[in-house]
Image: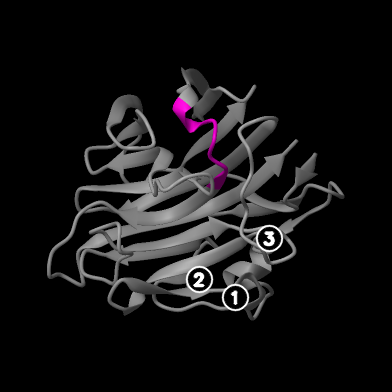
Amino acid sequence: MNLSRLSAAPAAAGLALALVLLTGGSAGAADPGKAPGGNFDLSVWQLQEPVGSPGSPTTISSSRLQGSNGYQDAYFYTDTRDGAMTFWAPEKGVTTPNSNYARSELREMNRDGSAANWSLGGSHRMNATLRVVSVTKNVCVGQIHLGTGGSSTKPLLELYYHSDGDIVLGTENSPSGGQTTRTVGHVPVGKTWTYSIAVSGGNTIDLTVNGSTTHYGIPSSFNQYKQYFKAGSYNQSSSDSTTNGARVAFYGLTVQHG
């Protein structure tokens, strides 16, 4: 089993946080003075931002994200108050060809720099500790997205946070489209919460929100597709505003495969 090596989690009440080095068991304080790559293992992620040319958002490679002096800007940065890895996606921004919504979002990569693209068999998990700082309508904070295997560009699932505090799971009905949504939790805006998105047995989604786990079957029509994780702020509303949008702060983010 391969574990990403760094995670961040609340260490105490207030804004105090700690980072845990999973491979060694040691711990150190998150440093608000470092770029996100100094506090999180970004060797397995690539960043997409809501800027660039129409239909072709800018991407930042894993190699540029890593390290204490790694990449950060107005859309992806360390919150200097608490060390959170923060994503900002305004309602007006550059989008991908298949979406009307802007995003500041990480896409899972392999450590050799290639795009992650794993089969449903085995076990796959993404764990996150986060809070939605602000949101206009709703924001997707985690995904399992379809990779190679066919022509579909849909996600297998998306985890949404709504402005009223509802946490909603959207599961795709088939690779051709159609999504079923279910409310799976409720957390006020600005409050920290946790999620775990996992696939087990090749046919089951295991979702845990604040310690409560539910399970959902994966239709066989997805079996031909490989998958990958995504996490960040994928805003689900659009307008001409560059000040309205979704800001999401992550205190922990790890992936594991086995």
The total number of labels drawn is: 3
* Residue at figure coordinates x 56%, y 65% from the top left: 46
Residue 114 falls left or right of residue 173: right
Quarter of the rendering occupied by the N terminus:
top right
Residue 83 falls left or right of residue 216: right
Say which amino acid is labelled 2: Thr
Which quadrant of the figure has residue 98?
A: bottom left
Say which amino acid is labelled 1: Gly
Question: From this viewpoint, which residue is outermost toward the front?
Answer: 150
Magenta residues, start to end: 221-228
Above/below status of 61 relative to 108: below
Q: Nearer the viewer, residue 112 or 102?
A: 112
Tags 2 and 1 in contact by the CB under 8 Å rule?
yes
Above/below status of 32 relative to 164: below
Instruction: Using the image, tell me which numbered label, if any, was put on residue 80.
Output: 2
The x, y position of residue 223, in whole percent, is 54, 30
Tags 3 and 1 in contact by the CB under 8 Å rule?
no
* Whole-number angstrom distance, CA of label 2 to CA of label 1: 6 Å
Mark found first going from the N terminus, 3 or 1: 1
Query: What element does badge 3 sit on?
Result: loop
- Residue count near mark 3 (Cα–Cα under 10 Å), binned few <14, some 14–19, many ≥20: many
Q: Nearer the viewer, residue 78 or 141?
A: 141
Q: How is the image coloured?
A: one colour
Residue ID for mark 3: 41
Q: Is residue 9 visible?
A: no
Residue 225 belongs to the span the image colors magenta = yes
Question: From this viewpoint, which residue is outermost toward the left?
Answer: 240
Above/below status of 203 relative to 20: above
* Residue at figure coordinates x 48%, y 19% from the top left: 217
Residue ID for mark 1: 33
Query: What element does badge 1 sit on?
Result: loop
Residue 203 falls left or right of residue 93: right
